[in-house]
Amino acid sequence: MSKSCCVTRCTSELMDEDEPFFSNLDLFLFSLIAGLLVYWIIFRKKAEPIPEPQTTRETSFIGKMKKTGKNIVVFYGSQTGTAEEFANRLAKDAHRYGMKGMAADPEEYDMSELSRLTEVENSIAIFCMATYGEGDPTDNAQDFYDWLQEGDADFSGVKYTVFALGNKTYEHYNSMGKYVDKRLAELGARRIFDLGMGDDDGNRFVMSGVNFMVYLLSFIVCSHRPFDSKNPFLAAVTVNRKLNKAGDRHLMHLELDITGSKIRYESGDHVAVYPINDSVIVNRIGDLLGVDLDTVISLNNLDEESNKKHPFPCPSTYRTALTHYLDITNPPRTNVLYELAQYATEPKDQENMRKMASSSPEGKALYQSWVLDSCRNILAILEDFPSLRPPIDHLCELLPRLQARYYSIASSSKVHANSIHICAVVVEYETKTGRVNKGVATNWLKNKMPTDNGHKATVPMYIRKSQFRLPFKSTNPVIMVGPGTGIAPFMGFVQERGWLKEQGKDVGDTVLYYGCRYKKEDFLYQEELEEFEKTGVLTALNVAFSRDQAEKVYVQHLLKKNKEAVWRLVHSDNAHIYICGDARNMARDVQNAFYEIAEELGGLSRSQAVDYVKKLMTKGRYSQDVWS
């Protein structure tokens, strides 16, 4: 106790003697505590779990597509941002068509994974590739470009398409897009849509890009349908009526029911139908060759490099092959004549056949006059060369496949979602040999009545996409020129413009130039067209009746008669021009009419007028759906 008091006392005495407030001991203890505190804080933090480093950037676009449920990847090669912007828009708009897309920078992903794209169901790779400098790839696409050049990847099964971005004023216009499109095909990828060519000269890129996007996405939707050229849909015929009121021709309107097929089409598309050969011709060939047409056969391809084991589905019969699979109505090519010549037992027949198959001037002239000008099919050749009796197996091997026939769809899916309309003229004519030749498809369709002994008549069909499209903006005027059955796609166009009006949309002038022989005979769809004009859907209905007066009047004459209105619509109002029908005469004459209008009212020379119309074509404002 005394020691304790002593200590206290001594401390009190020291403090009373004006000593420092903190003694050396205090300072030591304070420093020690502070040090321990700092040490504890520092080492406590170090003892805490160290956060794991962030995961590395994902370079697998396949993995990302699988995780996010995407089935479309849009790669872009972009220098200024235009291609990137377009790729993002394309990927975003895919959802409107029931698909999921993602935009991707090829610099950020392992592009060797492209061969694995088939792992993603219904997948498609789209490449929006800009060209930089003197035909070079953009910076972000350089590695991809190098890899494509050096690599030997196998892209079998990979579906793709390319949209190139460039400027026509430059020498290497869209060279990067062209290269990617070509190289992917070389490596085995399957091009599902033609190369899109974007031109940024004069602000045309926006329109070409939008058109490409709409066409592509519409096409992709249709490419996922279960019905195509290898698996056509059997559409029931619901309407088959004669359109012309008189005359010796038969012009018909058919309606095919596609309810439940999930087939989608747009105005301007084509419907492909698979016809059947006339049984009279098939039986006659069998009789001449002395064969039992119902014999079951299986023809095997001897060419080991061919990807087709059989020339048509086998086993089959000769009758089935000649009826459904082989083209027996078109004039045979020279190579067929050359092969068949060996079976002619008469030397003169053999000599003539070989001459027609040769490349000599005399041979070409003989083939032109005797086969083509006289419209001789294989049956006519067998009949006119009595000594020619080839083995039917070899004949079946040589004859080309019977192809689908394409017709412009005469309806709009906006109005007729479950129906496809066809407008066609039945082909039947007498040849120079006195034979009557009949069009395979039109004569077959003519007999397709809605009901046949209580059964629905059906037509195997599928859709072929087209770029014969109404303007993206409904406010753009349209000038449609389609005489005869060339009216077909314009029925769809007019129906759609009427539907747009009903939806409250602003619709530009809709002008039709139509031609036929006689008003009281073959004015196709007269009642419908006059009603469209009455309701204002058709701004102007101009009809040329070529034979109702002494002097022939055609659609090109009416165009020139209305030249001021035509020139205003085209030159000032950004109208789109559409031509449908005969390519050999009508389309050429109509184009000349536009040249003349541009010369007279535009003050252009002939060459300038030609260039003017060519520019309209380049811009997608002068479109043709023609045939010869």
Image: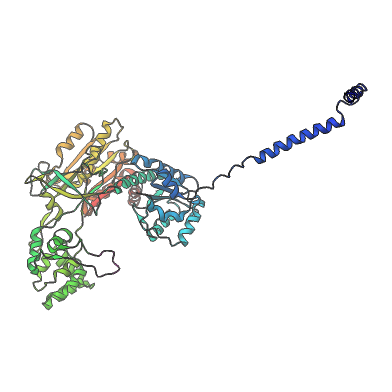
Q: Residue placed farthest to the front in the image? A: 1
Q: Residue placed farthest to the bottom in the image? A: 347
Check if residue 566 falls in the magenta segment.
no
Report the quarter where the C terminus lies.
bottom left
Image quarter for residue 5? Answer: top right
Seen from the viewer's position, the closer of residues 475 and 18 is: 18
Report x, y in % for residue 27: 83, 31
Q: Residue placed farthest to the right in the image? A: 17
In the figure, 154 relative to 532: above or below?
below
Can residue 470 be seen from the camera position used here?
A: yes
Check if residue 308 falls in the magenta segment.
yes
Report x, y in % for residue 177: 42, 54
Image quarter for residue 255? Answer: top left
- Report the label total: 0
Report the quarter where the N terminus lies.
top right
Q: Which residues are magenta?
A: 298-309
Seen from the viewer's position, the closer of residues 135 and 55 is: 55
The secondary structure that dominates the magenta segment is loop
In the figure, 575 relative to 534: above or below?
below
Determine the residue positioned at 18% across, 37% down. Answer: 529
Report x, y in % for residue 231: 23, 52
Left or right? Give the position of 160 relative to 497.
Answer: right
Seen from the viewer's position, the closer of residues 495 and 57 is: 57
Can residue 563 be seen from the camera position used here?
A: no
Report x, y in % for residue 376: 13, 64
